[in-house]
Amino acid sequence: MSSISRNLQAVQEQITTAAQRASRPVHEIRLLAVSKTFGPDAVIEAAQAGQAAFGENYVQEAIDKMAAVKALRPELVLEWHFIGPIQSNKTRLVASHFEWVHSVDRLKIAQRLSEQRDPALPPLQICLQVNISGEASKSGVAPAELLELAAQVARLPRLRLRGLMAIPEASGDDAQQRLPFRQLRSLLTELNAAGMNLDTLSMGMSADLEAAVAEGATMVRIGTAIFGKRDYKESDSA
Ligand SMILES: *Cc1c(COP(=O)(O)O)cnc(C)c1O
């Protein structure tokens, strides 16, 4: 068994254990394999071990990788999720190559994705990225502005608003680590109470998967624990 398939199995077991501890059905939690900086061979290995959904942060890297995977293994049916910061000059590529976008944090980007999504394709599945307390990155809509943005995005054609995403700062303390995830879940509850029909909480990475599952994650985005440590290069950019 390759190390990627062994790692995938270990992550699945971690998700199962975390779900059991939280008394949640394990099928509620989808695993997104974050393959940024890893090549097409790593994606193919994971796909052959049964993984279908992949997350990418850099548009051009992702598109090259999709083409390489398709050329090598045309029979694989994969689902691609864009999870990185989006520049407005890259929205057309994102709208045409991905099934999901987790990192929408302003209306202008959502409008462009909506205009540029081919009507022949299924709607682009959208999560709004929220800048909850202790956010590691500067991206994300402020919680106070979330309801208005969500209402506007929900009205756009060719998009389907599914839920929320966040990237909280890592904390050594388990109870502390759960707080931002709990906050994201309660924001989702508020939006649903306002009449939206959102089912997705994209939260949890390699280091905080268990805390995220305990607080209701429905999609965990795991890179390092599946593919190993990333080797960032200066040339990596959106
Ligand atoms: C890189 C990345 C991940 C994966 O992080 P790991 O710690 O390697 O599991 C998840 N989400 C986002 C938005 C990322 O940029």
Image (cartoon, helix red, strand yellow):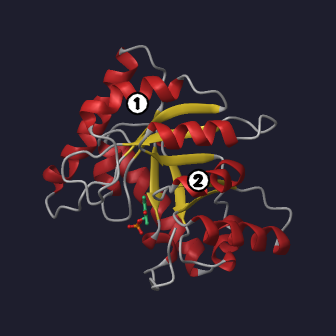
Instruction: Tell which of 26 and 160 is nearer to you.
Output: 160
**Three-letter code for the amino acid on which mark 2 is drawn:** His
Instruction: Tell which of 50 and 54 is nearer to you.
Output: 54
Residue located beneath label 2 in the image = 81
**How far is the residue under mark 1 from the one under mark 2?**
21 Å
Asked if residue 201 can be seen in this view, the reply is: no
Q: Label for residue 180? A: none
Asked if residue 136 is positioned above or below residue 43 in the image, the reply reads above
- The kind of secondary structure element at disc 1 is helix
Q: Residue at x 63, y 69 (%)?
A: 60
Q: Residues within 10 Å of mark 1 (few under 14, many from 20)?
A: some
Q: Label for residue 149? A: 1
**Three-letter code for the amino acid on which mark 1 is drawn:** Leu
Q: Position of residue 211 (x, y in %)?
A: 28, 51
Determine which quarter of the picture holds residue 54.
bottom right
Label total for image: 2
Asked if residue 68 can be seen in this view, the reply is: yes
Task: Between label 1 and label 2, give the one nearer the viewer.
Answer: 1
Q: Residue at x 53, y 56 (%)?
A: 32
Determine which quarter of the picture holds residue 171.
bottom left
Tell which quarter ligand 1 is in.
bottom left
Asked if residue 154 is positioned above or below residue 114 in the image, the reply reads above
- The kind of secondary structure element at disc 2 is strand
